[in-house]
Amino acid sequence: MINNEKIFLRNSAPERSKRIVEAVFRCKWSLTVYQLLAEKINRPGEMVRSVEGLTTKVLNECLRKNIEFGIIKRIEYNEVPPKVEYVVTPFGEKFINILDKLVELESEIVV
């Protein structure tokens, strides 16, 4: 008698992480924002002034999306004028490390 029981199931990418990676790579500014935060440039006005072609509107959309994913968080200070800063979350640190590994892997791809 032959046992037809399957030992392995079809493996696929984790659904939530896959959506995050797709969204980050679709947004051409997310990687730049991570680079700015790594350089301790964490205020929106300073971010816009530091990158040619980056607008406040696009930056805000990018920041909002990354906040929804839990990659970065917004810190509001109760000051006049209002002060806002963005920082990478512990989850964001792990996620950005994975993206860095993908960039390293890209350099090893032979076409």
Image: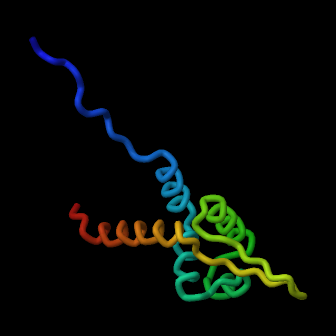
Judge by depth and name the residue closer to the eye, 105 or 14.
14
Its colouring scheme is: rainbow
Residue at 35% x, 69% y is 101
Judge by depth and name the residue closer to the eye, 71 or 90.
90
Residue 84 place in picture, x, y as percent: 76, 80
Judge by depth and name the residue closer to the eye, 85 or 32.
85
Relative to residue 68, is residue 87 depicted above or below? below
Direction left: furthest residue: 1
Relative to residue 94, is residue 42 depicted above or below? below
Judge by depth and name the residue closer to the eye, 103 or 4.
4
Quarter location, residue 6: top left
Residue at 58% x, 66% y is 71
Residue at 52% x, 49% y is 16
Residue 78 place in picture, x, y as percent: 85, 82
Direction top: furthest residue: 1
Relative to residue 34, is residue 46 depicted above or below? below
